[in-house]
Image (tube, rainbow, N blue to C red):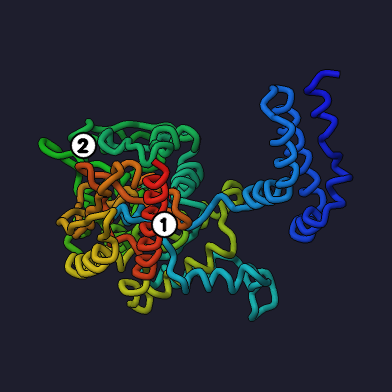
């Protein structure tokens, strides 16, 4: 018998291990099947190490003795959720990678209220008969925007797909060459048009498109004019885009619906200096556009959704499309959306919807918070300074607008800025920051005040980690 196979024989059996008190304690915490699974995996690892000649007799005994704690650690990791909270100190308000618009706690409560029980989602309490889920938001949004009808689907990409597929399948849709945009990697206007089953008819040029370009392109197969808000880029210089009123007139004359993909979902025109140029849904509708679609989780500040508003005839047709059933949203989205719209109805949205609050926070207010945080972070290991900087709206809204802010620029006295950034990302509540000129930049515009203490503890933990590393050298 070789030395290896002698050691292999010393590996205990699973049934023997299951008799240990410490393993029984694990079964109280996790299912028996999971524990058995964990033990088998661990024994398999030991077997491999033995066969590779890496394990002495002595080490093997130690590893067997510590089996329960190793298995416990593995099971904890296996059952830990992967999706979790992060602190967004990037200063990008609508950041797709970190979940776009954060919901207000009250919106989350509204979700909880309907999510954990039954609700009147599609039940008319007056008549005792079947209702329609859109009732929970349609009347309110129509009142807010002075329009006839509204419906909602999974996201704005789905809204564009549904609109095109319903109103223009196998027909031509006119789009300006300056608006054939890509938004966030996978949403490309030409691609979504193809999948919607419509024929893209490009009009004008990249920098200049005139109303006459649209007019000249209209023929008997033209079913729709689509205008796309070029959310994330801007053409400057020698450019022309028709006035909306001209397109409205052309659409009326030609009896072809005019649809606008408004993107960000700014409901009302804003006096905010960085949103003055952003067309609001209300103003686009008021100009006479037949149908407008936008996201729920960008500037609107609500849940992920694609909201379609406009003429009843068009919305009704979309509702009848079988694809609508494939893109509809559930009770949780309606609950959060309704709460969000109530805030617009009540005029409280600027102070209670997180995205709106972050947008309007004054630079001086952010400076005061950054100074306080800086004082708490300065230590033997870190130094910080306040600098003027810019926050971004993000999320394909007002792309070039930079909102003045103050940032906290932190440096580690002994470690690289990349190491500091990496450790912050690995904190119990990960902190997302950016690096500029070898400094770690924290913009508190996108950090909730109650999260500042978590940032302080993240730095404290990193400090003790760095101290530990130093003492080992
Ligand atoms: C963001 C955006 C979309 C995509 O919206 P989702 O809600 O992410 O699906 C489509 N069109 C425009 C103009 C946008 O800004």
Is any atom of residue 294 visible in this view? no
Between residues 414 and 240, which one lies in front from this camera angle?
Answer: 414
Work out whether residue 9 can be spotted: yes
**Mark in front: 2 vs 1:** 1
Q: How many marks?
A: 2
Tell me which corner region of the image, top left, top right, bottom left or bottom right, holds residue 47: top right
Q: In this view, does 6 lie above or below 358?
A: above
Whole-percent x, y for residue 384 in the image:
22, 56
Q: In front: 139, or 316? A: 139
The residue shown at (23%, 35%) is 213
Q: Which of 139 and 432 is in front in this view?
A: 432
Residue drawn at 60 percent across, 48 percent down: 326
Q: Name the residue under label 1.
A: 461
Quadrant into which the C terminus falls: top left
> Where does residue 283 sit, x and y in percent of width and height?
27, 61
- Judged left or right of residue 432, residue 6 is right
In the rendered structure, the answer to whether residue 119 lies left or right of residue 91 reads right
Q: How crowded is mark 1: few (under 14 residues within 10 Å), some or many (20 or more)?
A: some
- Residue 255: x and y, percent? 36, 47
Q: How far apart are marks 2 and 1 (CA)?
A: 57 Å
Residue at the limit of the structure toward the front, as seen here: 58
Asked which secondary structure carries label 2, the reply is loop
* SS at circle 1: helix
Q: Mark 2 or 1 closer to N-term?
A: 2
User: Where residue 94 sits: x, y (%)?
Assistant: 35, 54
Is residue 380 positioned above or below 49 on the image?
A: below
Left or right: 13 as drawn, with respect to 443: right
Q: In which quarter of the image is residue 49?
A: top right
**Label 2, residues with CA under 10 Å away: few <14, some 14-19, many ≥20:** many
Answer above or below: position of 112 versus 11.
below
Task: Specify the quadrant of the image occupied by residue 295.
Answer: bottom left
On the image, numbered disc 2 is attached to which residue? 209
């Amino acid at each position: 018998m070789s030395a290896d196979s002698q050691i292999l024989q010393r590996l205990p059996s699973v049934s023997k291990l299951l008799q240990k008190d410490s393993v029984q304690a694990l079964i109280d915490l996790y299912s028996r099947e999971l524990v058995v699974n964990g033990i088998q995996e661990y024994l398999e690892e030991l077997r491999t190490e033995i066969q590779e000649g890496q394990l002495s007799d002595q080490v093997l005994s130690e590893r067997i003795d510590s089996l329960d704690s190793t298995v416990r650690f593995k099971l904890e990791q296996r059952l830990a959720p992967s999706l979790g909270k992060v602190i967004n100190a990037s200063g990008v308000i609508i950041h797709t990678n970190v979940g776009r618009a954060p919901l207000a706690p009250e919106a989350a409560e509204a979700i909880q209220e309907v999510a954990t029980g039954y609700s009147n989602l599609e039940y008319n309490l007056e008549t005792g008969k079947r209702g329609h889920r859109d009732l929970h938001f349609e009347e309110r949004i129509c009142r807010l925007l002075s329009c006839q009808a509204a419906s909602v689907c999974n996201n704005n990409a789905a809204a564009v797909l549904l609109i095109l597929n319903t109103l223009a399948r196998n027909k031509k849709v006119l789009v300006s060459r300056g608006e054939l945009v890509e938004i966030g990697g996978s949403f490309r206007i030409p691609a979504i048009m193809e999948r919607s089953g419509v024929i893209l008819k490009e009009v004008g040029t990249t920098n200049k498109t005139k109303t006459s370009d649209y007019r000249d392109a209209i023929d008997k197969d033209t079913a729709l004019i689509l205008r796309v808000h070029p959310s994330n880029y801007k053409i400057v210089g020698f450019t022309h885009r028709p006035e909306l009123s001209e397109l409205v007139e052309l659409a009326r004359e030609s009896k072809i619906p005019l649809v606008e993909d408004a993107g960000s979902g700014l409901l009302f025109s804003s006096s905010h200096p960085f949103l003055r140029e952003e067309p609001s849904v209300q103003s686009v509708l008021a100009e006479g556009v037949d149908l407008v679609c936008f996201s729920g989780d960008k500037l609107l500040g609500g849940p992920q959704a694609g909201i379609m508003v406009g003429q009843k005839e068009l919305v009704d047709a979309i509702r009848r499309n079988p694809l609508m059933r494939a893109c509809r949203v559930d009770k949780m989205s309606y609950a959060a959306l309704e709460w969000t719209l109530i805030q617009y109805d009540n005029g409280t949205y600027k102070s209670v919807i997180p995205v709106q609050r972050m947008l309007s926070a004054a630079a001086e207010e952010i400076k005061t918070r950054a100074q306080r945080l800086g004082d708490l972070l300065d230590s033997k290991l870190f130094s910080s300074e306040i600098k003027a900087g810019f926050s971004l709206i993000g999320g394909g809204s007002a792309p070039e607008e930079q909102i003045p802010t103050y940032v906290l620029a932190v440096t580690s006295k002994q470690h690289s800025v990349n190491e500091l950034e990496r450790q912050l990302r690995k904190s119990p509540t990960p902190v997302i920051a950016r690096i500029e000129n070898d400094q770690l930049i924290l913009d508190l515009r996108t950090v909730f005040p109650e999260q500042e203490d978590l940032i302080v503890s993240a730095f404290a933990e990193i400090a003790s980690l760095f101290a530990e590393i130093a003492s080992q050298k």
